Image: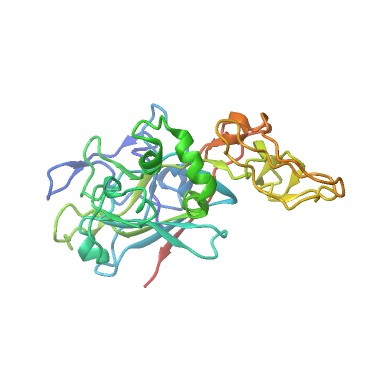
Amino acid sequence: MGYARKQNLGGKILAPRLSEESGEENPYMCNNECDATTEELAHPPELMFDIEGRNPTTFWQSTSWKKYPKALLVNITLSWNKTIELTDDIVLTFESGRPEQMVLEKSLDYGRSWQPYQFYATDCLDAFTMEPKTVRDLTQHTLLDIICTEDYSRGYVWKYDKTVRFEIKDRFALFAGPRLHNMASLYGQLDTTKNLRDFFTITDLRIRLLRPATGATMVDEGNLSRYFYAISDIKVQGRCKCNLHANSCVFDKEKLSCECEHNTTGPDCGRCKRNYQGRTWSAGSYLPIPKGTANVCVPNNIGPVIRTNATSLGVANRKEVVLQLHVIVLCFTSAPPPPPVVVVVLVVI
């Protein structure tokens, strides 16, 4: 891939260029000074996950659309090598104009198979033969529907209009209310509806960039260097899936693992320890609200087992460990792990 770096190239500030179609400044043009082999002129993928300060924004940048009319297709894959439960919106910040066509996909099996999460386009019917919708069109009964939205695909960026979202909290609100005050209702649904739990669960995310921002109906074939993708930030907030059997998640031996309790073991606390298989393993339960049920694994051959509410489940185990996955700084008992493994691939067609 060809990468660019930041506006300040060894002390030289790149002059903004104007989009002829919109009249808006597009200050992220490389002016033929991008070079993936030179650190000062490169824009590698890790710049999508660095912490932005007062310095000029850093961002990953793709190669330009020099092979038009062939599609400029780029896949960005994020892998955590761990099952993650999403707790907040997925937010992508573009510095090149938001793409005119894009698909967000998820995997539940470490990238072996993929399912669409949401489609994005300036014209959903033309791009994906789908009627345009927004998350506001969804109901409790249609929450799992895969939609195409036109809300995030308008041309070159405006000053406050850089982000593309996958709205997690708005979907939570269909059960918990607009201000998420009735979380008990949401917990109850998550506890009893596997499809709903799976919808908010991932091991990997893939961003498929299909068409860059052009700012017009026609592509200017005389200036193809203006068309590319650039992303300064990707935020994915979630928690390790520990089946409500852990209070914390640690990064050890290059992977995330739950610190399992309740005599459970495994990466997701998904089975009973040896000699604690007196009954079939079961995930912890949010019910009854508010304390839930721990479903502790019990020793072998101890006779009848009584299900008891466990105050240790409480709020801590219900939250397990909340992470901001692009930084991962919360609730760890060891040093914070690095960002997810990121693979950027230019798709050749």
Q: How many marks?
A: 0
Give 60 or 125, whichever is nearer the viewer: 125
Can you give x and y, in whole percent of width and height, for residue 100 in the image? 25, 55
Q: Quadrant of residue 332?
A: top right
Q: Can residue 49 be seen here?
A: yes
Can you give x and y, in whole percent of width and height, for residue 224 in the image? 23, 59
Give 299 or 242, whichever is nearer the viewer: 299
In the rendered view, how is the structure colored? rainbow
Q: Residue at x 85, y 46 (%)?
A: 303
Q: Is residue 346 above or below residue 232?
A: below
Left or right of residue 173, residue 82 in this image: right
Can you give x and y, in whole percent of width and height, for residue 31 in the image? 27, 49
Q: Can residue 87 be seen here?
A: no
State which quarter of the image contains the N terminus: bottom left
Q: Residue at x 23, y 35 (%)?
A: 159
Q: Residue furthest right?
A: 301
Can you give x and y, in whole percent of width and height, for residue 44 in the image? 45, 48
Q: Residue furthest top?
A: 54
Q: Residue furthest bottom?
A: 349
Q: Is residue 241 above or below residue 132?
A: above
Q: Residue at x 84, y 45 (%)?
A: 299
Left or right of residue 218, residue 266 in this image: right
Left or right of residue 271, residue 213 in this image: left
Left or right of residue 224, residue 34 in this image: right
State which quarter of the image contains the C terminus: bottom left
